Amino acid sequence: MNTVMDSRAIIKTENLWKTFGSNEVLKGVNIQIPEKSISAVIGQSGTGKSVLFKTIMGMMKPDRGRVWFQDTELTALGPDALISMRKHFGYSFQNAALFDSMTVGENLAFPLKEVLRVKDRGEIKKRVEELLEWIELPGIEQKRPDELSGGMRKRVGVARALMMRPEVLFFDEPTTGLDPVLSETINKLVVRVNHELGITCVMITHDIPAAFRIAGNIAFLDQGHIVAEGTPQELTNSAYQMVQDFLRISFNGMQV
Ligand SMILES: Nc1ncnc2c1ncn2[C@@H]1O[C@H](COP(=O)(O)OP(=O)(O)O)[C@@H](O)[C@H]1O
Ligand SMILES: [Mg+2]
């Protein structure tokens, strides 16, 4: 079995702290994301999972600690260098903020034009077309986001993140608010992103059975710390009470 320590970490945090006023959210988080894995971060609501993602991506500055992407310490970089390194990351947040005033095609072209500064209109058109085909929504370039269903919007959000050809794709609760069938579509998309494109996927999810099915590595955040981390099997063996309670409730009494 491939455990966290066996494979190379593409992202690593060291003693990450983040406090808002008197609210100590991250209290020394150490996490390693194995390269080309699907990893899941789970834990109760409000424990700091999204804050952890934001500090890793450099969208939020930790009070203390380090974040590494491959051999680069992101927390040691100045603003320009950080922005440049962030091109390796894509993210799909819960409210997949598509621009409602733009068509789907324009939404997808946006990161290419504005971030990567691609000028060749033919190339942009081709990449938008290819990616829409890849997410199995061919030909919807001219549609507006509000004409799409929730599940379609979500897939377009993922496609937009993929336009940048990131090495790591972060998903913050990609299936929250979707019905079980749509959730499965999104989970399958995460698996395809990982298997077919070789992109490391890190997701925060409340869907524990899905995390157990698709993630090779699961980290449990509680009280500001990663209290359990490893393969799904390793997590079920955790002696930490909250992990045990969480898994028991999530699997509704089923044997895991
Ligand atoms: N920008 C912010 N300013 C102040 N407090 C914040 C901010 N972002 C998150 N928090 C607080 O940090 C805690 C963790 O939030 P969050 O990471 O969103 O939790 P989770 O994603 O695990 O549900 C919460 O108490 C939240 O209120
Ligand atoms: Mg969150």
Image (cartoon, rainbow, N blue to C red):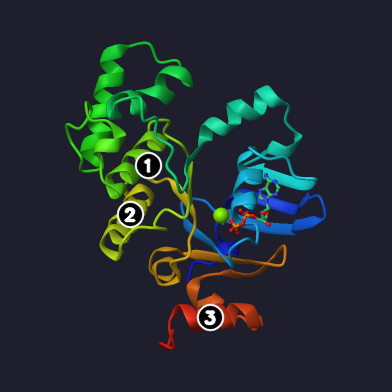
* Mark 1 crowd level (few <14, some 14–19, many ≥20, 10 Å Cα): many
Measure how far apart labels 1 and 2 are at the Cα level: 9 Å
The amino acid type found where label 2 is placed reads Ile
Decide which of 160, 74 is in the foreground and name it.
160
Q: Nearer the viewer, mark 2 or mark 3?
A: 2
The amino acid type found where label 3 is placed reads Thr
**Res 146 → quadrant:** top left
**Res 72 → quadrant:** top right
Q: Is residue 124 above or below residue 82?
A: above
Q: Is residue 149 left or right of residue 2?
A: left
First in residue order: circle 1 vs circle 2: 1
What residue did someone put label 3 on?
Answer: 236
- Residue 158 is labelled as 1
Measure how far apart labels 1 and 3 are at the Cα level: 30 Å
Q: Is residue 57 left or right of residue 23?
A: left
- Contact (CB < 8 A) between labels 1 and 2? yes
First in residue order: circle 2 vs circle 3: 2
Residue depicted at x 41% and y 17%: 113
Q: Is residue 64 left or right of residue 80?
A: right
Q: Where residue 29 sits in the image (x, y, percent)?
A: 72, 58
Quadrant in which the C terminus is drawn: bottom left
What residue did someone put label 2 on?
Answer: 186
